[in-house]
Amino acid sequence: MGSAKKNELDQLCVNTIRMLAVDAVEKARSGHPGMPMEASDIGYILWTRFLKHNPIHPDWTNRDRFVLSAGHGSMLLYALLHLTGYDVSLEDIRQFRQWNSVTPGHPEYGQTPGVETTTGPLGQGFSNGVGMAMAQVYLADYFNRPGYPLVDYFVYGVVSDGDMMEGISSESASIAGHLGLGRLIYIYLDNRITIEGGTELTFSEDVGKRFEAYGWHVQKVDGYDHGQIASALSAAKEAADKPSLIIARTHIGYGSPHKQDTASAHGEPLGPEEALLVRKRFNWPETLFHVPREASARFRTCLDRGHEWESAWNRLFDAYALEHPDLAEKWKACHEGKWPEGWEKDLPRFEPGQGPMATRAASGKVLEAIAPRLYALLGGAADLAPSTKTFIKSLGVIKVDHGGKNVHFGIREHAMGGILNGMALSKALVPYGATFLVFSDYMRPSIRLAAIMRLPVIYVFTHDSIGVGEDGPTHQPVEHLAALRAIPQLVVVRPADAGETVIGWKLALNRKHGPTALILTRQKLPVIDRTRFGSAEGLQKGGYILAEEPQGPPQALILASGSEVHLALAAYEKFLEEGVSVRVVSMPSWEVFEAQDAAYRKEVLPAGVKARLAIEAGVPMGWDRYVGDQGKVMGIERFGASAPGGVLFEKFGFTVDAVVAAVKEML
Amino acid sequence: MGSAKKNELDQLCVNTIRMLAVDAVEKARSGHPGMPMEASDIGYILWTRFLKHNPIHPDWTNRDRFVLSAGHGSMLLYALLHLTGYDVSLEDIRQFRQWNSVTPGHPEYGQTPGVETTTGPLGQGFSNGVGMAMAQVYLADYFNRPGYPLVDYFVYGVVSDGDMMEGISSESASIAGHLGLGRLIYIYLDNRITIEGGTELTFSEDVGKRFEAYGWHVQKVDGYDHGQIASALSAAKEAADKPSLIIARTHIGYGSPHKQDTASAHGEPLGPEEALLVRKRFNWPETLFHVPREASARFRTCLDRGHEWESAWNRLFDAYALEHPDLAEKWKACHEGKWPEGWEKDLPRFEPGQGPMATRAASGKVLEAIAPRLYALLGGAADLAPSTKTFIKSLGVIKVDHGGKNVHFGIREHAMGGILNGMALSKALVPYGATFLVFSDYMRPSIRLAAIMRLPVIYVFTHDSIGVGEDGPTHQPVEHLAALRAIPQLVVVRPADAGETVIGWKLALNRKHGPTALILTRQKLPVIDRTRFGSAEGLQKGGYILAEEPQGPPQALILASGSEVHLALAAYEKFLEEGVSVRVVSMPSWEVFEAQDAAYRKEVLPAGVKARLAIEAGVPMGWDRYVGDQGKVMGIERFGASAPGGVLFEKFGFTVDAVVAAVKEML
């Protein structure tokens, strides 16, 4: 297989990758040997002849990106990282898949130098790469100047049958084709094997034709013919106005006499006997984790080239800084994650006198006000911008030849999630994406990965309850607050009014290590009078005393988030008239509240007060911890219904009278 | 637009649909007029000339199915239902989008006669239709006999740009093409408008070419040329070995002078002035909800034809019953949702002596044992059958010309979810689908719809915790139990051992009105000795006393689910030695437990016992309600890690010593 003659040294290098993978999986007694064995040739050619990177400085900003979307083949990546000179030792390879190693089962961003993104859940890497290429367009458009191609990196990826079948990849491929992302180059391992058997069981589409339909540049190669691989990669780079798919006919478990081209090569070690046969097949010594000196020397040439590339770029940047000092300053600020001095002054203020306002509308005003100065902030909606209020009118649209700020993601929530992650992985941008809260389900796998990677992604989820009204149960989230709160490292913020929405944005923009979901209403809400009640800045503590009991300790606590805070306040007014001492606690964010010290939390929720009511137009799950054994939760334990929003709140029991009655019952 | 001459009566009928939609949306002051106005011609031709249905008996089993995947255009469907004679009155149309009406904002299955599936979340209907067509293949293969085409219905659908962009549709289209589902015919409204504006903003792919790549039969028509529409539908029916896509060039808001071809026709009423202009354009009287007598008569011909069709089919069935009495009996049982007499006797039994067994393995044995007799049960995995143990070796694979029982869904979790719903909507089948629990996120929007529709779908989610081990955090669910439990009407069952797994399947198969998720381990677990501990039948109550305190009231309760029950039992043994009276409660299903009467729940969890520990290898969210103010939850509040599963349980603090210590601290 592979018609072109292969240089002996090249072949030795390829087999070094292959055998490191075999040995690591055998030693761990766990892993996926088939893919690294299959793709060693491709990995070798790409990494040593095309990828512009500097192993000793994996974070060099203008490096080419490499995405292993087929993350189960992690040993391919670890072998390449080790061999080309990254800080991944042979001992690390020996620790493959062990506790606290830098070589976990799937590539994990932040855990291993040179790993650009966390992959494994199929299709995610594919989508991340599209986001990376979009970030390149955005950054290049803003920073590049004649003679100064500061941002000209390519995004390469290796993708599998699984990636091709997943919907998120289809969505991402469609938008990548639409945008003509010429710097995106994916190699598809067409091995015709999946876990359940041959792809003929379930996958008979013409992938090449499909990608041509998306507007991609498509080529086919023999995955073992180094000449073909290199030519195709060169041609892909030349095709500047289209993303490229190189379909490489490959063989899973390449070189394994009994397992090549079978599903059994995919997800389990070859076993000692078969591993030995592979050794013989490649004329490989018995020593485990053997790296021939000549191969090592060949791989290490990446170090010199990497040093040269980065040095040249550094010189370029120095000259750029002289000629364009303002831009150079912005560049630095952007890459250090700093917002411009005093940006918070641009945040709008809202007063009760302005009349009621939906929090989605307040959010839109915040974006309009701050976005022009916050270069690093960009985003858009999954075809719901007019509803989510996320289109910034004063700024342009992102296109292949123009890095406008607004992104039209299309009706592709999942791709939006993966693309946001890819943009954030630039470490220079803070992307946001919007849709209805109920459709957060469509992008949940990507939200989870943003949380795992602790990326500064912002979600704008509007239409946050039965307040959606007539569109009915399919469009009314009831379980989504709970479901999002369940995700570790994600901060969920549900502001009670326009004022809290402003502070919610401030919190999200200042949060550098993890995603934030802003949960906003469709319907209008009064703007709370902050001269009378607690400051909206209290949102920064997750929960705060909004309405204080007039005297003495409170007899009851009413906790609420979002639109239901207004019910709590109305009940408070009633109790005030009746001389009952009640405290209203606004609880926009559980995660932020939990991060406060115990003293603060006790101050807000005094242990002695057992009469506690929580109000939220969603499933009650999780509120028990705040209301305790003697408390109550007013929530919704069914799906919604189609009717005007006001009618629904009434029918579902969210009335001031019901709140008052529930509290009184506890007193 | 539309070159062919249109019969005047036809045009009157089309405009009747169009104007009913305009009036209903105006009256509700809410809704989507653009799509029904756009697709009235298509709806009219399809429903009056092609769709084989019987309006007075919407459940006639051999009717053609109609799926409005673009569910926001619900008024198109309601107008057709009303006009062709379903039990949807003009008064119902007037109540469009109001509380308790049969004409909710989006079509809702079970709420309106003739609505085949709940749609609105884009792509779901597309996928449901594929499932319906797969059900047709499965049923036809089994029941049809020479001269008795008992099951020969077609599945028609109307899909939109949004459906085309959603990943779930891509996945579903790929599998439909693979299976060659010739009875699936979709009309795509190519209107080149989305909410954010023209499709040129974000959607420039060649949809026809893409579907050809999937193996579909593709045609293009003018969406207002009745001759072209009818010819294309006939040709689509002829193309027996391929699903069909008819790309109809249409205009959103057709006939609206100022809103046609604009995004503003999509999601809001035209407004009184524009509605008046549309009236004039179509020469329509000012009376609202006007239905011309001639049009009504034309539509009502569907009643006679429907009666004839069904009567002929009933005669066919009677003859079939004489010739094939056994099959006719099976047919009836299947459609009445009855399992064969005594089927539960086939359920396997497991004894501790058999050694430890993963619950996924026990589940596989259950399936192997019961599937051959349970004709209505069919399913498969999203390319993980060898891991989820869901391939039934004794039975065949579903193909277009053979209705085997096993489905190869491919790496398409979301399509699997939508297809399962479509299969269940046959009201004759109980489908199951399997993947890793962590990937339940990929299919969550479809799970939600199964719950909304109360469909008897069974999910087999394996690899249910950090017990997954080396594959690491991307493959280890920690928040998924909580996230699934948050969905109303979904029952989540996490069995503690092989014995509970058997009862879990029994519960799922006996549950006719709602989906069930079985949550299973990758790792082996001991089989609990039921001679000494509570019977596994206790699972049917959601939670039950597994290990009884030796004497007197318990000093502490330990609650756990799944693999963590064994930790609880091990701690119980220690306490037994020490003479401390502890009760272990196995809690495989919260939803089922909550459905028990208060007396039973108090018996299991006596109010007086305040020292309570819950153990579950996932986020603690929601357990507070069971452990109370003085209790504790041993859970995981972070993402997992890559290492052998045993090491992870240790590192994450799940040890017998830790359980004992936590309980003692409370005593």
Image (tube, coloured by chain):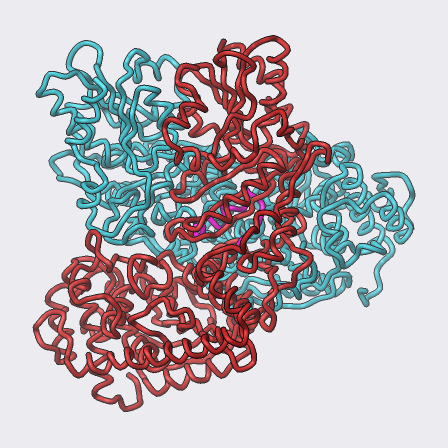
Chain colours: A red, B cyan
* Image quadrant occupied by the N terminus of chain A: bottom left
From the viewer's perspective, is B294 left or right of A617?
A: right
Query: Residue at horizontal 42%, vertical 37%?
Result: A591
Q: Is the magenta stretch mostly helix, strand or loop?
A: helix
Is residue A436 inside the magenta stretch? yes
Classify A455 as above or below A213: above
Classify A194 as above or below B500: below
Q: Position of residue A259 (x, y in %)?
A: 21, 69
- Of A62 and B663, nearer the camera is A62
Is residue B237 inside the magenta stretch? no
Outermost residue on the bottom side: it is A5
Q: Quadrant of residue A57?
A: bottom left
Residue A153 visible in the shown view:
yes
Classify B213 as above or below A569: below
- Of B449 and B31, nearer the camera is B31
- Of B241 and A594, nearer the camera is A594
From the viewer's perspective, is A477 left or right of B575?
A: right
Q: Where is residue A408 in the image (x, y as percent from the top left)?
A: 61, 60
Query: Residue at horizontal 41%, vertical 81%?
Result: A233
> Which residue range is magenta in the image?
A432-448
Residue B180 visible in the shown view:
no
Q: Quadrant of residue A55?
A: bottom left
Query: Residue at horizontal 44%, vertical 68%?
Result: A204
From the viewer's perspective, is A398 left or right of B618?
A: right
Q: Position of residue B199 (x, y in %)?
A: 66, 63
Q: How many labels does the image show?
A: 0
